[in-house]
Amino acid sequence: MKTDDDAFVRIDEVLSSLKEKPSKGLLYGLISSKSSPQRDEGSKWYISEEEWPHDTYPPWAHGPGYVISRDIAKFIVNGHQERKLKLFKLEDVAMGIWIEQFANGGKEMRYMNDERFYNAGCESNYVLAHYQSPRMVLCLWEKLQKEHQPVCCE
């Protein structure tokens, strides 16, 4: 699993959810499908036509946290060691690009979208809550221990 340092992750729920998922060819998280590159030069996420000439990205998982299967991780490590994979400045989209290359090699892919991976803040029944300060992370942990339910602190 990849996660940001400002995200609170319910590891217990991730592990429980993964028991039902395939162990190969898996991307699990908040999946974005058919999203388009930001072409506004003033944007933090600007991508030029030269960087990505296509109208849409392949499916990718939002950056605060996602899980990839071991076979994908090995493919990416080997691909970079052999200099076969292109770097891309948006790490979450880059992962989607590399996974598409993995799938194009004849591998079966499963994209498992989970709306409980919150990209912007916290909502009840979360698996992942993003943009959490250290104080909020502690609060979320304490609430989870006390109430045994994923309840936000705000």
Image: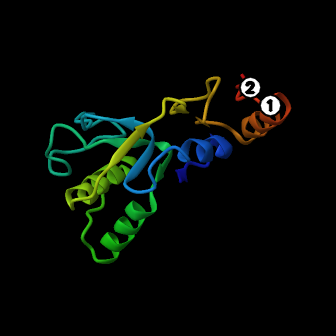
Q: Quadrant of residue 31?
A: top left
Does any portion of residue 6 appear in the rendered image?
no
Q: Is residue 142 above or below residue 106?
A: above
Tell me the residue at 48%/46% (across/down).
Answer: 21
The disc label shown at residue 143, or none: 1
Residue farthest to the bottom? Answer: 82
Q: Quadrant of residue 133?
A: top right
Q: Give the quarter of the figure containing the C terminus.
A: top right
Image position of 16 (left or right of 45):
right
The disc label shown at residue 5, or none: none
Residue 120 on image: x %, y %: 53, 30
Tell me the residue at 35%/35% (across/down).
Answer: 32
Image position of 112 (left or right of 154):
left
Residue 107 on image: x %, y %: 27, 58
Residue 152 on image: x %, y %: 70, 25
Mark 1: which amino acid? Answer: Lys
Q: Write down the residue under mark 2.
A: 153
Classed neighbour count for the residue bearing mark 1: other residues with Cα under 10 Å, few (<14), some (14–19), many (≥20): some
Tell me the residue at 61%/30% (across/down).
Answer: 126
SS category of the residue bearing label 2: loop
Mark 2: which amino acid? Answer: Cys
Choose the circle earlier in sequence order: 1 or 2: 1
Colouring: rainbow
SS category of the residue bearing label 1: helix
Nearer-the-camera pick, 134 or 33:
33
CA–CA distance between discs 1 and 2?
Answer: 8 Å
Residue farthest to the right? Answer: 146
Residue 131 on image: x %, y %: 60, 36
**Contact (CB < 8 A) between labels 1 and 2?**
yes
